[in-house]
Image (spheres, helix red, strand yellow):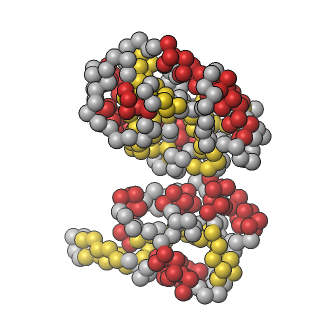
Amino acid sequence: MINIERAKRLMKDYGFDVLLAVSPENVHYVTGHMSLPALLVRGFMRGALILPDSKMPILITHAIERQADIKVETKFYGRFYAETKDRTLPAEGYPSLASAVFEELRKRSITSGRLGIEEDYVPCGFYNQLRSKLPGATFINDTGIFKELRKTKSDEEISKLVKAVEVCQTAFKAVLDRLAEGASELEMVSMFKQATAAHGGDAKFAFIAAGQRSWVPVIPPSNYVPKKGDIVCFDMGVSYQGYNSDIGRTVVIGKPSAKQIHVYQALLKAQEEAIAAIAPGVRSSQVFKEALANVRAAGYHSYNRDHIGHSIGLEAEEEPFLSDNKEVLEERMVLAVELPYYIQGLGGFRVEDDVLVEKGGSKNLSTINKELVEI
């Protein structure tokens, strides 16, 4: 996924001699390899080295992945055994991830200089081991470089994000069918997960809450069955081959009240105008301020948000955020644009779409109906 030449230019700009990625998302981004053990096993660690003289990154992972189909140069640590018809085949590598990183650097005579490491992520034990092996190196947090690299997407990444949106929308439609049959929150979440898996995705999250529960932004599903007049608030995310969607919709059981319609229309109009304002070169703060002003102009003077959206990619919520910051939007960013509103006694309202920043403007990747849905 990574543009290695761009990474090297940033390394030069930041003054790094080596970059080390450790978080699952950044290792995936650097190498293109999505490790199932890293997703499933707590404490499973990998690393990816970007070296100034190499055209490809180096993946360092546990020997359990020796048989995996990995497209980049790979080194292993630890032990794993597999049986064949004739004998046991030991898969053995370096003693630890830290020793593997050290030896691969030592082979290339890189034992000093400025080493970039994800200080926001690495466990203390690994960090201390590596520092003891490389006393001549200066360790500097490289999280900012990876954020810079990942904020714009390649064609392959955009294709996976589009697929994640499609799967999420298909699963949402399946949930609406269950809701029409009188499903509880728990049954709707279960259906979302089933429908997502059936279409090749992984349900990253599904916050589905109804009635008085819907005004709480993040709440576990219950056995509550929505009744006439209830708002049902949907905040849904699907991962497809590691890339995430994030979509929000609002449903009413029966005919919506005048108040429900007015609130939702204010949010929808502000969100659509925010999407229309998104384009390369536009400041995030401009989109943010205008969206809040539009909701307040509709009569909701206390409406406030820290942000009205964020980037999506290997994580469901990434930087940059659509907030009052200095960020300038760039072509190939993919943003989840959201204007939720939570009102005690009335319910939770959410409209959220995934939007590609493209030349001259933006494209909404979410294609399902955004009007207030009546069941």
Image position of 283 (left or right of 132) = right
**For this rendering, which residue is in front, 116 or 263?**
263
283 up-or-down from 295: above or below? below
246 up-or-down from 146: above or below? above
Give residue 62's quadrant in the image: bottom left
81 up-or-down from 272: above or below? below
Quadrant of image for the N terminus: bottom right
Q: Residue at x 53, y 32 (%)?
A: 340
Q: Is residue 193 visible?
A: yes
Give residue 111's quadrant in the image: bottom right
**For this rendering, which residue is in front, 316 or 362?**
316
Q: Which residue occupies the extreme left position in the image?
A: 85
Quadrant of image for the C terminus: top left
Q: Is residue 19 visible?
A: no
Where does residue 293 sit, x and y in percent of width and height? Answer: 69, 29
Where does residue 286 sit, x and y in percent of width and height? Answer: 74, 36
Where does residue 360 sit, x and y in percent of width and height? Answer: 75, 32
Number of marks: 0
Q: Residue at x 62, y 41 (%)?
A: 307
Q: Residue at x 49, y 32 (%)?
A: 342
Where does residue 322 sit, x and y in percent of width and height? Answer: 65, 41
Q: Residue at x 46, y 47 (%)?
A: 241
